[in-house]
Amino acid sequence: MTLSPLAQRSPFGGRFEVEREVGRGGVGIVYRAFDRETELWVALKLIAVQGVDASEEARFLREGKLLQELDHPHIVRLVACGTLEDTPYVAMEWLEGEDLAARNKRAAFGLRDALEVARQIAVALEAAHNAGIIHRDIKPSNIFLVNDPSSDKPFAKLVDFGVALEDDVRLTRTGVVVGTPAYMAPEQAKADGQLDARADIYSLGASLFELVAGRPPHVGPTAIATLARLVTTDAPRLSELVPLVPAPLDHLVFAMLATDPARRPTSARHVADTLAALTGDASTTDVTLPRSGPSVQTTAAVQGTRLFTSIVGLRMGGGEGRAKIVEQLRHRGADAVALGQDAVVAHLGARRSLGGEAPRALELGRFLAEKGGKVGVATGRSKVDLTRPVGEVVDRAAGLAHSADPSQVLADTTTTE
């Protein structure tokens, strides 16, 4: 085995005997290491990027600080944190097993196991929320399934509190979207306000949706397309993809994925109790779930379609400047929202047909381009009985925006015709 540079100068800080690297992220590397002080194997997380500023170091150590406040069987346990050899570190208990994303890719779940995993994470979230902590990045790869040969039930632990947030958000960089697009709450994608526990409830709902349906509720070809979908399009119901899903589960997940946070369950405890009732219900059939889901087959009655146009502007800046741009788009008749760190998404004709949507969209696209934006415009059809546009058109507009140069508008054939 080839040792990493850190392992070659082990023990790190005179304490941790490093065995091997097991993963890395934006600024950190995780090692499997033996802690001489506690005589435990740990996951040792270190900042690996030279020259990170003090705020990044503080954000890195925040995970250790938060985990010190959480002692729960379904949350990864902190062993130690601090600074050694002038390097910030966080040491967590070593977990044998695999994360939920890897497990679901390797083999499909049964429905009861999927509900039990979601219940355990909901209980963990209740503990975190009661401590004033919002995780902000609930997703299958941050849910770890621990090997337990003595039990026939899965045992899950919530990991990676590196982007979690307490009431004090001074260490959070304004306007930066933190999270994973496919599982991110709409209000988190907009980055326009402080999050609360309902953002985690949405993300858990998206993760459970994927376990049952074999795909997240919103999927786009790019990150910005996925974000645009989830802030402009309601999630499909589970029953549209898995017709035999129990009705109470269908209602619960639909509520967890509500675009408006006020329509979601009020607490993680409510979610956990509902899932516990479902797993204990004899009528809940333990069917094998798909690993990759079918395409959405909408069962709602379709009364016809109408044309609508989507506009995606990238590199639009942030703060008050972008807010004014959004207001100007709305004043000109577009349904517009700020998205992420520097994007703007707008629609014409999505809620009601006004006529001339495409030329008006091109005019608005030029307006955004004059502000230095990379702009994409696409036109398609929306079902009349739906109040929000289908995501495929948003995907095309987002793809065009990515391909555009600064101060350029690219439009699809339907729009230009």
Image: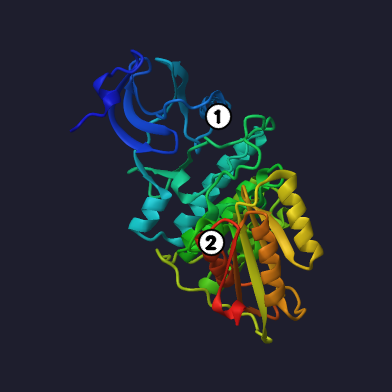
Report the disc number at residue 46: none
Q: Is residue 270 above or below residue 88?
A: below
Q: Is residue 101 left or right of residue 324?
A: left
Residue type at tag 2:
Ala
- In this figure, which residue is indicated by the disc labeled 1? 59
Query: Residue 353: x and y, percent?
Result: 75, 79
Q: Secondary structure at mark 1?
A: helix
Q: Is residue 366 left or right of residue 159?
A: right
Query: Residue 86: x and y, percent?
Result: 43, 16
Q: Secondary structure at mark 2?
A: loop
> Image quarter for residue 123?
top right
- In this figure, which residue is indicated by the disc labeled 2? 404
Q: Quadrant of the N terminus?
A: top left
Outermost residue, bottom side = 304
Residue type at tag 1:
Arg
Give me the residue at 68% from left, 30% from top. Answer: 168
**Is the Cβ of the residue at disc 1 closer than 8 Å to that at disc 2?**
no
Query: Residue 64: x and y, percent?
Result: 51, 26
Query: Residue 6: x and y, percent?
Result: 30, 24
Q: CA distance from mark 1 to mark 2?
A: 34 Å
Does residue 356 appear anywhere in the picture?
yes
Dot 1 surroundings within 10 Å: few (below 14), some, or many (20 or more)?
some
Q: Is residue 41 above or below residue 109?
A: above
Q: Is residue 271 left or right of residue 116?
A: right
